Amino acid sequence: MAILAILIVAATVGGPLAAHLTGHSPNTPYNNAVSNRGIPIGVLQHPYNADGTAHDPHAKLFVLGADSLGRDQLVRVLYGARVSLIVAFGATGVALLIGISLGLLAGYCGGWIDAVIARLIESAIAFPSLLMAIALAVVVGPGLLNVLVVISLFTWFYPARIVRSVTLAGKDRLYVQAARTVGARPRRLLLVHILPQAWGPLLVFGTSIVANNILFEASLSYLGIGVPPPTASWGQMLSDAINSGFYRINPSMLLVPGVALVATMLAFNLLGDSLRDALDPKARR
Amino acid sequence: MTRFLTRRLLALVIQILLITFVVWFIFFIIATITGATPAQRFAGRYATPQRIAQVAKVLGTNKPYWEQYFLFLWHAVQGNLGYSYLQQRPVVDILLPAAAATASVVLGGMVGWMLIAIVIGSYGALRPRSLGDVLGRAFAIVGMSLPLFLVAPMLALFLAFQPTQGQLFGLHILPVGTHLFPIDGYVPLAQNPVQWAYHLILPWLALSITYAAVYARYIRTLTIENLAEDYVRTAEAKGVGRTRLLSRHVGRNVAPVTLTVLAADVGGALGGIIFVESVFNIPGLGYTGLSAIENLDYPLVAGVVLFAGVVAVLANAIVDLIHGLLDPRVRLGR
């Protein structure tokens, strides 16, 4: 939880605050943060002086070093938290919306509608989703909104499956029938009486899928088909470190976004685990 | 039996059709709407309209969309996945050697991560809440949070490279620069088995670290559930030993379910392979796909996605069929 709190603070005020304190904007390449041979400076180093021969102790410190273009890693990693969270929560939200609607529709209507949706969910789960998402992302091109839509298109079937099974089991319960007898419309039945039965599993699912979506976004950005270049994102910072080859000289280029990513994933996975233990004692895995 | 077979095979056919349709839709419809048509891309930037029309006729892209899809399917069945824009040779000729390299990486990695998972998972199930179990679960949750594209370069950094500074945060803390394993490329199995394994150890390790976690957790919960069953008590009463109980009695119940999950993960592993292959320079499907993505070589990307997708779906179907043959509950289920 603590990590989550830090993360949310980082995503909201951390970026601008760090930018203010260090005097470095997230997307500006600083020439003096790269040596004459093109090697970026490391952790806690001052930028080079005008002729690039020595570190200038009066210039603003690069707390977590610089990337291959000379941008401040600290500022970028904090701004990257913002992108990660927007995409992860946004995609989870869209996936839940699609999944809940289709799940309710399938479970409540039954018949051929249910058969079609159930088959769709079944085949979608067997789909290699990362591959397909990569394929779609290649074609629609990079962009924050594109990434969000692509990710949600390949995750909606899990909530759909949960909601469908809950609706199937729940629509014939006595209190639902009672509500129907007193004249509740289908909309009210679904939203007020049936859907709340699914909140527990959906919450557990939601946290673990947020973690997955953070990874998903980082993977797409790492491949250069996620969030478009000047915007900072963790996947992109990792790919910059690896593709420029400078991580061999400055492992911190890899560790800064890497630790941010792993800590976030860990926080969400742990949260999902404890939620599962608390809400769903019979869950497997 | 026949009912189960036909149902599963029908589902397989639908899934394959769905994959071909999605791939075709993505690369030949959306790509055409958002960018240049395949004919334009193939003919090059400076081609005249007549030339583009000519190429479109050869490629068959001047026909209505539905006809194009069936043409695409027909060609795919015949083993023709089109021509790479950049390399100007059949996609299949590029895919097949790449698939061999990828198979070595994925299958070897699977053996690695299953071994780790079985050891950690069954130990945790036998002695729940012991120190080893707590450590094992900690490993599992950390492993689940480690992205492949962080693990692979870290392994490369610590075990394969000779960094010029060899420092971390400005200090000589970690033994960087050991140069134990090669980073450059891949030696086919047929050429030299020892070199083949030597070049693949790091990729296998990277896959094992990231994927073992899920299976260790899975095997642990399943084994704990099974150990509480009556048949275990009966076996113990008969005097069956610990090893035999675990391997013969519990193992037979845990293994098929775990295999099903493993097959479902083939698709995920084929996606993750991109990061491993690009870091360790293995000329497999992921590496080919990545360079095709960078060059916007759509037929090649489509070929890689289609091939990997069909392999993933086939793996699922085969495991389901075997599971159904062995376990009547699955065959008659639902």
Image (cartoon, coloured by chain):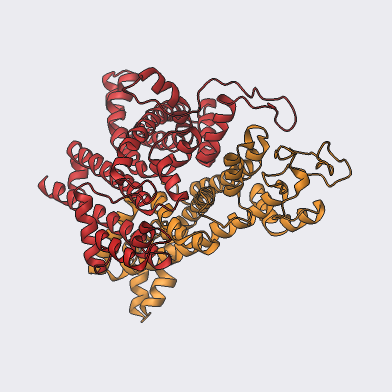
Chain colours: A orange, B red
> Can residue B12 be seen by looking at this rendering?
no
In this picture, is A211 found above or below B244?
below
> Can residue A21 be seen by looking at this rendering?
yes
What quarter of the picture does the N terminus of chain B occupy? top left
A43 with respect to B268 (left or right): right
- Percent x, y for residue B6? 14, 50
- Percent x, y for residue A150? 45, 59
Q: Nearer the viewer, residue A122 or A57?
A: A57
B111 with respect to B159 (left or right): left
Residue at position x 54%, y 20% in the image: B180
Residue that sits furthest to the right in the current view: A58
In this picture, is B188 found above or below A190?
above
Q: Nearer the viewer, residue B19 or B116?
A: B19
- Percent x, y for residue A220? 50, 51
Residue at position x 23%, y 68% in the image: A112
Residue at position x 71%, y 44% in the image: A66
